[in-house]
Image (cartoon, grey):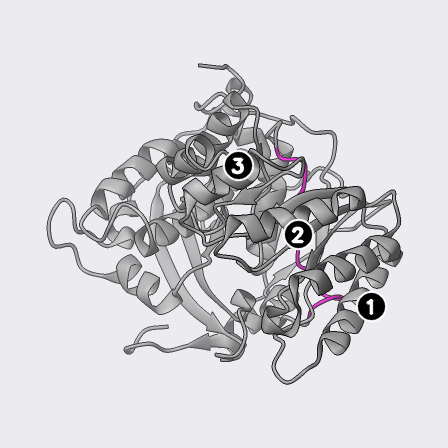
Amino acid sequence: MSDDYDFGLPASAARATPPCEVVDLRAHLLRATNDVGDVDSATETLLIEIEDADGRVGIGEADTASAAALALVLMDDVHLWCRGLRSAVLGRDPVQMTAIWHDLARATFLAGPSGVARHALAAVDIALHDLAGKQLGRPVFHLLGGARQPRITPYATCYAGPVGERSLSDMLEATLELLERARALGFRAVKMEVLFEGAASDREIVACIREGRQVVGEDIELLIDFGYRWTDWRRALWTLEQVEDCRIYLAEATLPHDDLPSHAKLAQRVGTRIGGAEFATTWQECLAWLDIGQVDVVQPDVARAGGFTEMRRIAQSAVERGAMVIPHCWKTGINAAAARHLQAATSNVPFVEMLVPSLWSAPLRDEVVVPEPLLDDGYIALPTAPGLGVELVQSAVQTYAVEVGGVS
């Protein structure tokens, strides 16, 4: 096995003070809107706060069906494989986050070793890393082994929203406007969302991508999200062959998420990188994407796939196979901060997704934490503050908290 990653707490992060144990875990469901006509997961989140005996608080979130995950966090203990995450964390030393992660995985085994249970675990794991970083006075990426990148390189996702009653011309115009704004903001990479469904034929999608490349120019990396457009890998192949000269950095969500054999057929026949696994929640699932699906890029989300602890295992397996990790990240500033720390400490994460307030209106993304990172010449400086480097805005938490079954 490569020694590219050290899974223990680095010696540089060791502390001289005695452990400060967890005394409380609070979970909140935050929701800005309900819109069954869109796929905007930034409208809701499961927020986790973990407090230690000295009053420090670590925060995390899950990209999930928040009400279901909330129940798993707060439920009573039943037996060894069926415990509430809150009770399993109380009294623990957050710096021992890897050991805690494995205990939490066992505690939620009956709920399922993947899916919503792993989403909930991700939120707790992120919060534990934030709290441990605050206890040690270190940014989270120090706890992950230290800087492997000189700076953070985000890409801007340009999503014009659901098609609805709009024409292809309307959708393309809105998308191209977002691409132009992202270019003006200084991004060095952008993702063009061509989730145009039945409003566009494959030939029209090709023409749209060509216009997108023309807008951003030749110096900006162009990623394309196809929104699981095809069930036939040969149609996907034809389309990608037509836009080879557009120099697409990554083709995302080309085929049904779980159709790994078709992904392999496509990946073996095109020069464009094929990505997938945005809904993967475990290391084992991502291994299947790499070994069976033969993808060049896996795209799990830190707030879905078990938090930092599991994402590091995924990154390790990817680097051993010459593959990349470009994490999905469409949530609040908590998940965005987590993705930045993951990239900082990981050699094979070339970009992180950035949901930019000026490109997409998302109240939870805009308001729940501060500060917003500064983009300078297309880059973000490595974090320096302890933990994740972002803090909750309690007034926003109170504004967007909703009750589910008597808890919020």
Three-letter code for the amino acid on which mark 2 is drawn: Thr
Answer with the quarter of the image where residue 221 lies: top right
| Rendered view: 98 above or below 160 | above
| Rendered view: 94 above or below 62 | above
Three-letter code for the amino acid on which mark 3 is drawn: Val
193 relative position to 174: left or right: left
Q: CA distance from mark 1 to mark 2?
A: 23 Å
Residue at point 69%, 70% (across, down) = 160
| Rendered view: 273 above or below 194 | above
The image shows residue 122 at horizontal and vertical percentages of 41, 48
The tag earlier along the polypeptide, 3 or 2, is 2
Question: Label 3 neighbourhood size at 10 Å, few (<14), some (14-19), many (20+)?
Answer: many
Three-letter code for the amino acid on which mark 1 is drawn: Glu
| Rendered view: 214 above or below 161 | above
Answer with the quarter of the image where residue 70 lies: bottom left
Res. 177 mark? 1
Question: Label 1 neighbourhood size at 10 Å, few (<14), some (14-19), many (20+)?
Answer: some
Q: CA distance from mark 3 to mark 2?
A: 18 Å
Residue at point 58%, 58% (across, down) = 330
Marks 3, 2: nearer the viewer: 2
Start and end of the magenta stretch? 349-360
17 relative position to 238: left or right: left
Residue at point 71%, 39% (across, down) = 152
What residue did someone put label 3 on? 295
Res. 239 mark? 2
> Which type of secondary structure does the marked residue at label 2 adopt?
helix
